[in-house]
Image (cartoon, rainbow, N blue to C red):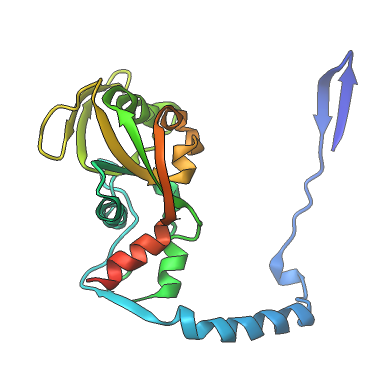
Amino acid sequence: SLYTVDNGQIVNKEADIHLTFHSLINPDQTVVNMLTHYEKKLSRQTKEIISSIPRDLSRKKNSKGQSALGSMIVSAMLEKTNSDIAFLHHGGIRFSLNKGNITLEDIYRSLPFNHKLVKMQVTGQQMINILNQQWTYEKENLLQSNGISYQKTHINNKIIELKDSLGEDIEPDKIYTVVTSDYLAYGGDGFSAFKAGEVIFTGETIRDVFIDYLTKR
């Protein structure tokens, strides 16, 4: 890249883009042999069947921003921590699960990140602030959630009604327990409002929690 600087300010920049294609690159045989060795070694574990599901669990979001797979994962998080509400960002779920036998490899493909479970305390108002950040940017970023339902305005996307799982209003000054990922708890994906909450504990990875949830069923 070439930058033109005038009085400490970049006034122009130029760059050449060099395209690369995998098909034109010959793989290093030493690396290929090493990867093949470990792939065979790990396959005994990754091909292990941990559960079976009667129908597809898609990561595709519905009109309310929720997915079948996301809903099951946040249910697992709630059950593990006995929290009031669960939140998970959709970007952390990479692949859907097809009906039938589920292997460890399937779970790692769906949840490849080592995000850990975080239980925290937040007020009702802090929860509203978190939810409002779903529309901070031009493209909405809806959280996978469990334990709440809400309504928003259509003009400026602000929460106007927030209820718990029993249909009771979430009170702004009341303390609620929320389980989420460490990624969100510390402000990831644009959700800085999570940082106002008080972390109670950090547990195992969400992936391990979900595996445990599936093996019990």
Q: Quadrant of the C terminus?
A: bottom left
In percent of width and height, residue 53 lies at 24, 72
143 or 59: nearer the viewer: 143
Please tell me in which quadrant of the rendered image residue 149 appears. Answer: top left
Q: Quadrant of the N terminus?
A: top right
In percent of width and height, residue 62 lies at 26, 47
Does 31 sit left or right of 213 as displayed?
Answer: right
80 or 90: nearer the viewer: 80
Seen as rendered, the residue at the extreme front is 200
Q: Is residue 88 visible?
A: no
Seen as rendered, the residue at the extreme left is 167
In percent of width and height, residue 171 lies at 20, 23
Q: Is residue 190 visible?
A: yes
Residue at x-position 45% and y-position 40%: 184
Residue at x-position 39% and y-position 30%: 197
Does 22 appear above or below 92? below
Please tell me in which quadrant of the rendered image residue 3 appears. Answer: top right
Does 49 sit left or right of 112 as displayed?
Answer: left
Residue at x-position 77% and y-position 46%: 17
Does 208 appear above or below 93? below
45 or 190: nearer the viewer: 45
Seen as rendered, the residue at the extreme top is 7
Residue at x-position 77% and y-position 82%: 29
Does 31 sit left or right of 157 as displayed?
Answer: right
In percent of width and height, residue 162 lies at 20, 28
* Number of dots carrying numbers: 0
Does 202 sit left or right of 147 as displayed?
Answer: right
101 or 13: nearer the viewer: 101
Does 44 appear above or below 6? below
